[in-house]
Image (tube, rainbow, N blue to C red):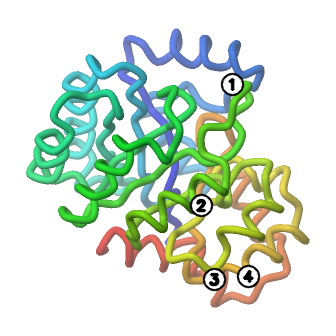
Amino acid sequence: MIIDFHTHIFPDKIAQKTIDHLSQIGGIPYHSDATATGLVSHMEEAGIDISVTLPVITNPSQFDSINRFAKQINQEYANKKRRLISFAGIHPDCEDIDGKMAFIAKSGFLGVKIHPDYQGTYINDENYVRIMECAREYDLIVVTHAGVDVAFPDVHCPPELALELIRRVPHSKLVLAHMGANMMPDGVLERLCGEDVYFDTAYVLRFIGEEIFKKILRAHGEDRILFATDSPWSDIRGDVEILNSFDLNNITKEKIFCENAKKLLKI
């Protein structure tokens, strides 16, 4: 089994326009049309069994519509051969964070996605602290973008601020995307490795290199690394092949490809 813990999809009617826009502002190509059917097609090519889809709310007014789409995905793909599990989205500027996090939990979502860069808020902000407190109370996974996002000049979730959040609100179901902090491996090794959080491999496998990957893996532990691609921004099959090419034993690969995610998702 292979679980891809970090992907993005959009409703069919806006998917092409959305990824064209995001590709332009970030200066990066896309590898899928970012629809649910497009993602499933690439999952089949790569042998992925389950993909976690992560909505990003860039404006608090999107809360209802984006989470309605996420719930529809969960209902439609719950029993499919290639399963999609959508998390909910929340914005730190949403009114009544407590109520919205309670709604997310009651709606059956397993987790939430936040993106400090797209949401223009540093990860140690009090509203993110409250989101984390609610996530811990409701046993929800939190996935956050961490490190550099090429579309933004400021880094809103660098390792030092991520560590501040971790110390304020310890929560073992926090996932720091992009191996702890995209393009900031030294900070990850210095500040984050060994903390009670997960790292995912989204987007970074093509760039990080086997040596640095294994250095972070040894320092952080093989039980806290999740295979992820960031599709449509990475080629799913290519990322599977890259991880398989690394000199890792089969038990370690099995943990990264699925066992760690299965425990987190309670599968």
Q: On the image, which quarter does residue 72 sit in?
A: top left
Residue at 38 percent across and 28 percent down: it is: 57
Mark 3 in CB contact with mark 4 (< 8 angstroms) = no
Residue bearing mark 4: 219
The three-letter amino acid code for the residue at tag 3 is Glu
Q: Which mark is residue 152?
A: 1
Q: Which mark is residue 126?
A: none
Mark 2: few, some, or many residues within 10 Å (few <14, many ≥20)? many
* Label 1 residue SS: loop
Mark 1: few, some, or many residues within 10 Å (few <14, many ≥20)? few
Q: CA distance from mark 3 to mark 4?
A: 9 Å
The disc, 1 or 3, on the residue closer to the chain's N-terminal end is 1
Q: CA distance from mark 2 to mark 4?
A: 15 Å
Residue toward you, 197 or 229: 197
- In the rendering, at what x and y percent does residue 228 appear? 59, 56
Relative to 257, is 186 above or below? above
Residue bearing mark 2: 200
Mark 1 in CB contact with mark 3 (< 8 angstroms) = no
Q: Is residue 102 left or right of residue 122?
A: left
The three-letter amino acid code for the residue at tag 2 is Asp
Residue at 82 percent across and 51 percent down: it is: 206
Q: Is residue 138 left or right of residue 218?
A: left
Residue bearing mark 3: 222
- In the rendering, at what x and y percent does residue 50 appear? 42, 58
The disc, 2 or 4, on the residue closer to the chain's N-terminal end is 2
* Label 3 residue SS: helix
Q: CA distance from mark 3 to mark 2?
A: 11 Å
